[in-house]
Amino acid sequence: MPRADSINSIDTKISRHVQRCPRGSVFLPDTFATLGSRSAIDKALQRLVAAGVLRRLSRGLYDKPRHDDLLGTLWPSVDTIIKAIAGKDKLRTQPIGVYAANMLGLSEQVPAKVVLLTDGISRTVQAGPMQIRLQRTTPRQMAAAGRLSGLLIQAFKSMGVQHITPAHIERLRKNIPADERAKVMKDLALAPAWMRPLLREVAQDDTLTLPTPPQWKASNT
């Protein structure tokens, strides 16, 4: 007969793991799947929530809260949540809509609902005030996922050709390194015909290359 899980041992191992992780980290019960049964893991996480070590964001989703002297307790970043959700099954995700445009600095609008395409199952995750929608799509839509070209294609789709200005193109050319922009040409066939001239403008070489901005670093995952 298999030996029952040692609750104290599981509690200790999960607690130590959480302590080693930086504030802002996000956890799922599956994060600790190798340590014991699901029921024992759930109870250990509940005890850490009761102790104020973890915060329950929604069913089966927890974080180690970050604190700011002025803003108080902060919510985890969307990117951190997505990595935690997608990590176990190695899902690919592709930001779309206003979120994609925001990541590239093309929009100052911060969406209350974040939508990402995925090659996994469709699901909606509520994390505090944020709602994250993973929407299953076709292999073609995911062909450029995780690359700058995929983010540009989805951002431009959300904006529409009539709203993409020379100023937007110039901003992208200044903020994204030339070597990264050049890679966009490899995925040109994945973009709608109307968008290809705009992507060529973004990708063309020049003498001005600025450091990689936070928006591009966050999207390159």
Image (cartoon, rainbow, N blue to C red):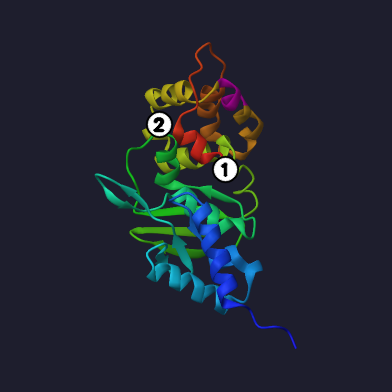
Q: From the viewer's perspective, tell me whether residue 18 is left or right of residue 75.
A: right
Q: Amino acid at mark 1?
A: Thr
- Viewer-proximal residue among 158 and 151: 151
Q: Give the residue pinned by disc 2.
A: 164
Identify the main secondary structure in magenta: helix
- The mark nearer the N terminus, 1 or 2, is 2
- Give the x, y percent position of residue 62: 45, 63
Local SS, label 1? loop
Q: Amino acid at mark 2?
A: Ile
Query: In the image, what residue occupies the spot 61% across and 60% down?
Result: 120
Query: In the image, what residue occupies the spot 52% across and 22% down?
Result: 201
- Give the x, y percent position of residue 157: 46, 42
Query: In the image, what residue occupies the spot 62% across and 42% down?
Result: 144
- For residue 80, say whether it is visible: yes
Specify the quadrant that holds the N terminus.
bottom right
Q: Check if residue 180 falls in the magenta segment.
A: yes
Tag of residue 221: 1
Determine the CA span between mark 1 and mark 2. 25 Å
Specify the quadrant that holds the C terminus.
top right
- Viewer-proximal residue among 8 and 208: 8
Is 205 above or below relative to 221?
above
Kindly indicate whether the residue at mark 2 contacts the one at mark 1 (C-beta within 8 angstroms).
no
| Range shown magenta | 178-182
- For residue 121, say whether it is visible: no
